[in-house]
Image (cartoon, rainbow, N blue to C red):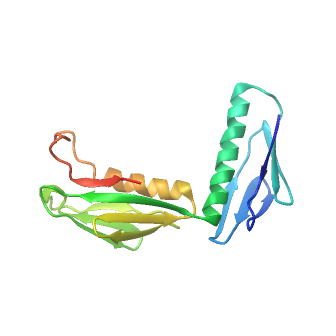
Amino acid sequence: MQTTITAPEGVAVRAENGSVHAKGPKGELSRAFVHPLLTLSVKENTLTITSKDDRKETRALVGTWRAHLNNMFTGVTQGFERKMRIVHVHFPMSVKVEGSKLTVQNLLGQKNLKIAPIEDGVDAKIDGENIVLNGIDVEKVGQTVSNIEVATRLSNRRDRRRFYDGIYAVE
C-alpha cells in the first residue's frame, strides 16, 4: 500500500534519519516517523508513505501519519488558535500569564494558587474573560489547554450544576 501527500506551496519539506522537517512562513516543525512496517520518503515536495502489508492496523497507522503530516503543514502555514473562557460565579478570579505558566488566584475563594504550565512555543494572552492560545504545534497547544483545565478543575465534592467556576475550552 502506498499513499502520497503533497506539501502546500510555501512549505519546504525534508526527511533525514526517520524525521520529517517542515519549514513554512510561521516557523519550523520536526517529528520522528519510525515504524518497522512503514517507510517515508520525500521527493521534492511530495511525501510517500509505503507499507509492507495491507492489514487493517497498518492502514490505520498510515492514516495517522498522514494526519500528523497535514497538522504539521497547517501549523507552519496558518498556525493553531484555541480560545478558553474564564468563568467565575461565586468569587472574582484573578488570572495572570507569568512567563511559561498561568496562575489563577481566588478560585472559589481558595487561598492557594493554581498553576498551569504553558508549553514551549505556545503564546498565551488574556483578553477580558477569554484566554487565547496560539502556536504552530497542535499537540503543544492542545496540551496547554488541557493543563489549564486540569489546574482549575474543582473537587468531586462540588456539584458541577451549581459551581461553574473554572477555565474551559470554548473554541
- The relative height of residue 93 versus residue 39 in the rendered view (above or below) is below
> Residue sitting at 35 percent across and 73 percent down?
98
> Residue sitting at 37 percent across and 53 percent down?
170
Left or right: residue 122 compared with residue 57:
left
Report the label total: 0
> Residue sitting at 26 percent across and 64 percent down?
104
Q: Quadrant of residue 39?
A: top right
Left or right: residue 132 compared with residue 41:
left
Please name whichever residue, 96 or 169, is drawn nearer the observer in this view of the structure.
169
> Residue sitting at 16 percent across and 39 percent down?
159
Left or right: residue 161 compared with residue 168:
left
Image quarter where the N terminus lies is: top right
Image quarter where the C terminus lies is: bottom left
Please name whichever residue, 16 or 130, is drawn nearer the observer in this view of the structure.
130
Q: Position of residue 38 (x, y in %)?
A: 78, 39
Q: Position of residue 113 (x, y in %)?
A: 23, 63
- The relative height of residue 8 versus residue 158 in the rendered view (above or below) is below
Please name whichever residue, 117 or 40, is drawn nearer the observer in this view of the structure.
40
The residue at the far right in this view is: 43
Left or right: residue 107 compared with residue 70:
left
The residue at the far top in this view is: 55
Q: Position of residue 3 (x, y in %)?
A: 80, 41
